[in-house]
Amino acid sequence: MTAHPVLRDMGSAWLVPLADLSMILFIITAAALSAQNPAPLQEHMREGGFAQGAAMAVFVDAPGGPALAEWLAVRPPGPGELLTLEARYAAGERAQVDARAHELAAQAIAAGVEPRVILQAAPAGSARSTLRAVIAHDADPPAP
């Protein structure tokens, strides 16, 4: 039994229209992505946020918890990862939180990790200061 002559002659000719359609889809997707509004990121930066990648590991400075140096011994930053100390202070606690952030930075440096330290006011209405260390694939934010 032989194949129909039209089907036999098709061969791989159907690949050309498929490649064309793929290219059209790629161009439409690229155009849509380039037209997206970057306003949410710009708004975040205006509100005092900072650029940061997705956290790979998080350490929260809390009473009774492990020391930062112990945590870094278990989970050191890998290639391309940056340790960021995020210190957010409530009203009237800036000096204490700043001092603690620099204590943690000294611990990290002693452990062989150069941290980035970010000190900023806690969100409005927050009565609690927080300090955490984050390891992320990250880069320093661009200057405004």
Image (spheres, helix red, strand yellow):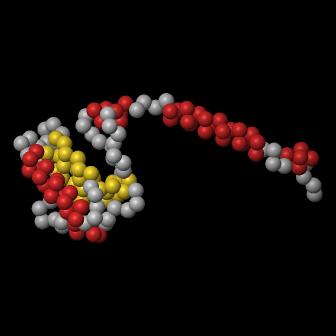
> Residue 49: percent from the left, percent from the top?
27, 40
Q: Which of 116/44 is in front?
A: 116
Q: Is residue 131 above or below residue 124?
A: below
Q: How many marks?
A: 0
Q: Is residue 63 above or below residue 16?
A: below
Q: Which residue is the extreme one toward the left?
A: 92
Where residue 20 sits, quadrant-wise, is: top right
Q: Is residue 31 left or right of residue 89?
A: right
> Residue 125: percent from the left, percent from the top?
13, 38
> Residue 111: percent from the left, percent from the top?
25, 66
Where residue 100 sits, quadrant-wise, is: bottom left
Q: Which of 33/114 is in front?
A: 114
Q: Which of 6/1 is in front?
A: 6
Task: Point out the image quarter for the N terminus.
Answer: bottom right
Residue at point 81% right, 44% down? 13
Q: Is residue 78 left or right of residue 103?
A: right
Q: Is residue 123 above or below residue 100?
A: above
> Residue 61: percent from the left, percent from the top?
17, 58
Residue at point 27% right, 51% down? 116
Task: Point out the image quarter for the C terminus.
Answer: top left
Q: Which of 27/140 is in front?
A: 140
Residue at point 21% right, 54% down? 132
Q: Is residue 29 left or right of residue 130?
A: right
Residue at point 61% right, 39% down? 26
